[in-house]
Amino acid sequence: MNEDPIQDLLRALADADAAAEAPPEIELRLTREFRSRKRTRTVRRLAWCASAAAVVLVFAATLHYRQRPPALAAPAAVEEVVTDFYPLVNPAPPFERGRLLRVEVPASAMRMVGLPVHAERLSDPVQADVLVGEEGLPRAIRFVKFETK
Amino acid sequence: MSDSDETLLARMLKGDEDAFTTLYRRRQGPVYRFALHMTRSVAVAEDVTQDVFLMLLESGRRFDSSRGTLLSFLYGIARNHILRRIEKDAREQPAEPAEIEDCIGSDGVVDPMNDLTRREAIETVRRAIVSLPPIYREVVVLCDLEDASYEDASAALDCPMGTVRSRLSRARAMLAAKLEKKARLVKKTARIAYE
């Protein structure tokens, strides 16, 4: 026993509580939180990548359209089918005005928003509408398919 | 060989869930007991433990190994939460002022171990610790109950090591005085009961 009774009592208290631990529910809650944060980070990273990719694509498409000679004739009896808009910025800032740009992107862009694309067709060109905000940032994208009537 | 806390933290920050779990299991006990001994409240100790590790998820990148160990970083976060809680509780339920100064000057030698049963003595120490002012309480809890080094305590409490030593010495003197007073009271009560 320690010669100092106070030290001895403190040691006894430390020993008595040595096994005291937080209940398992806290670990569960924290693990859930960890997973949720990890998901959010992944989605944000994807959104950022998609956003960056869209900026590049819009720029490239703008150049392409400027250089392209006017079309000789519009395709006859073709119907446009569009998907929903997929946000490119998460969380989406308030949107008031903007413009819609028709661009051509590789099919891999569809994968970025979670749409299924066959692995062999990832580099195929697809038409897409990019919603660009007033400040010039792409906000959302939808994909266009042409179906012959 | 098991990974160091710092390695686990680095892996955790890259999204490794196993690293987070290992780190949590390794360090939740000391954090929980620190809060428990500081407040004597299981509910507060649970809240603080959860908040500390949430904060680690949120701000783990702020950890700087040149300023101390990860455990002292966790103690530091816990301390901020605990002190806020103690202040809040004190505002809502003002406590009786602790009779520290009155006790310190008492003379005579009383060995509390001889006058109280061990279990009672432990409970008495627990209560006596909580009645210390927080700046003394935290050094006793960290250095005497959790065996933290002066260096770790200094990093956790954000004060020089000399201050940790002097506060610890003062805190032990306060505790001794409180326990001595309690032992005298027990003796006196027993005498009255027999007479």
Image (cartoon, coloured by chain):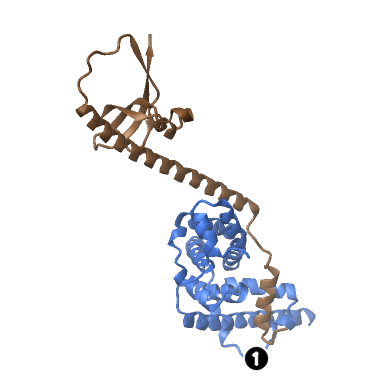
Chain colours: A brown, B blue
Q: Which residue is at a point 59% across and 61% down the rendered structure image?
A: B28
Q: Does residue A14 appear to the left or right of A72 in the view shown?
A: right
Quick one: quadrant of the N terminus of chain B? bottom right
Name the residue tied to disc 1: B108
Q: Does residue A25 appear to the left or right of A42 in the view shown?
A: right
Between A74 and A16, the one lying in front of the other is: A74
Between B159 and A128, the one lying in front of the other is: A128
Q: Is residue B41 visible?
A: no
Query: The numbered mark 1 sits on a residue in which chain?
Result: B
Q: Does residue A11 appear to the left or right of B164 in the view shown?
A: right
Quick one: quadrant of the C terminus of chain B? bottom right
Q: Is residue B23 above or below residue B123?
A: above
Residue type at the position of mark 1: Gly
Q: Position of residue B68 (x, y in %)?
A: 48, 71
Residue B129: quadrant of the picture: bottom right
Q: Is residue B107 visible?
A: yes
Q: Is residue A141 above or below residue B102?
A: above
Q: Position of residue A11 (x, y in %)?
A: 67, 76
Q: Is residue A52 above or below residue B193?
A: above
Between B96 and B18, the one lying in front of the other is: B18
Q: Position of residue B9 (x, y in %)?
A: 52, 59
Mark 1, Cα crowd under 10 Å, few <14 / some 14-19 / many 20+, is few
